[in-house]
Image (cartoon, rainbow, N blue to C red):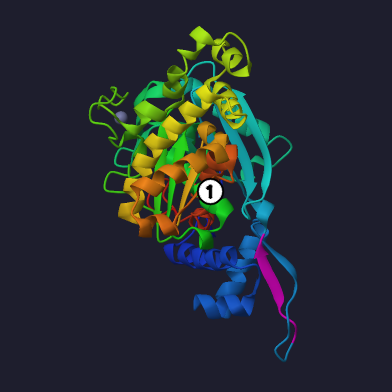
Amino acid sequence: MRTLPPRGGITILTRSRTTVGSRRRILELLLARDALSRAELARLSHLNKPTVSNLVAGLIDEGIVQEIGSGTSTGGRKPILLSVRGSGRLVVGLEIDASSCRLLLVTLHGERLSMVELPLERSEVATVVEVVAAGVNSLLTNRDRSTLLGCGVAVPGLVDPANDTVDSARRLGWEGTPLRSLLAARLGVPVMVTDRGKAAALGELWVLGKERAHDLIYLYLGRGVAGAIVLGREIHWGASNIAGEIGHMTVDPDGPVCACGNRGCLEAFVSTAAIIEQLQPVLATKRDGPLARALRSDAHDSDVIAAIGEAATLGDPDAGAVVSSTARWLAIAIAGLINVLNPSVVVLGGPTAGWGRVLTDAIDHELGQRALPLSRREVTIVIGHARDLAAPLGGAALVLQRAAGLLAGSEPNDGGRRSVA
Ligand SMILES: [Zn+2]
């Protein structure tokens, strides 16, 4: 590293490309393993020992790496073991929804430190950027702000990798919105953005552990229906970065018009609004009970959906019929997907997945009639373990997967859409 003379009162530190590459190799090794000695780092990185010692000294000075004790001797002195200091740098995972922003602070080791949810009164991007900045400030209260490594964002819409913008997020009223660059400028750290389906799938992969998720389909069931396809433990992004838009699979060519303009998309049948709409006739005959009260209230969609699930579990026939109908439409889409992709697990997330067993049992029943026996035999339909945290966790995962490059100073702040998973 060399220090350039102060310019305008600011000392600018630059590193040669070789040094950055070597730092990155050291950090990749340390982030992938619990503890390594300097000698092991030299052997694994193919760098000489003095270079490793210099780089490690710099990383210790910066608070990124720490000495954690002695390892086993192979003849001489016991080696000192090194590891990445989890709290040496922090990452924010963020989910933006139409009504709120949820931010999660994690360490480099993925330890969850704190979470904050802030309401969104308005969804113009300038307002959202300020709300996010307030949320980050709140998470970093009493912490050194310079430890923030980056922010990974999940949005309910399509993200265009070519222009680095949120191409379309109808629920936020966004079109061609340069969220990443606006947030990066406001927060002063690298920002990565992806759609909520892929972020939530990354969050579930994190919780499931990659060993259990070689091939996986993720479905987010909420006001919109998003998804992601994981093949060979990697998110499949597709040519335009929008692979996994399962909500816009046509399940009935003569079905209702979807928000995308097409007719009979899965989302047009199983979005929370479509589910609640199906139960409106019930109000004519049902005057009381928890289901009728929930449908008559001004409650948030997700609360009404929860009430429907509870009523179905307790045997309410109207709620049960809507769960069966929702499961049938989902099974039509899932049968096609598992026949084509042959995954071992389909993970359901989002508010409607809160119905739990009553939903997965109904989907299982439908799949028995619709999917090929061999694809059906190997697949399990499960409710996501990460629940409400899936999308913010996935946002954090976007940054953590590039941590070595960001810490080494070799990552361009380009959104990083393809290097994840
Ligand atoms: Zn559609």
Q: Secondary structure at mark 1?
A: helix
Is any atom of residue 399 visible in this view?
Answer: no
Percent coordinates x, y for residue 372 in the rendering: 33, 54
Is 82 covered by the magenta stretch?
Answer: yes
Is 69 covered by the magenta stretch?
Answer: no
What kind of residue is marked 1?
Answer: Glu
Front position in the image: 257 or 228: 257
Instruction: Name the image quarter holding residue 376.
Output: bottom left
Q: Is residue 171 left or right of residue 400?
A: left
Instruction: Name the image quarter holding residue 303.
Output: top right
Residue span colored magenta: 77-84
Q: Quadrant of the C terminus?
A: bottom left
Q: Quadrant of ligand 1?
A: top left
Percent coordinates x, y for residue 143 in the rendering: 71, 40
Percent coordinates x, y for residue 299 in the rendering: 58, 16
Looking at the image, which residue is at 66% across and 62% down? Answer: 60
Q: Which residue is mark 1?
A: 204
Looking at the image, which residue is at 59% across and 46% down? Answer: 385
Residue situated furthest left in the rendering:
253
**In the image, residue 387 above or below residue 305:** below
Percent coordinates x, y for residue 361 in the rendering: 51, 43
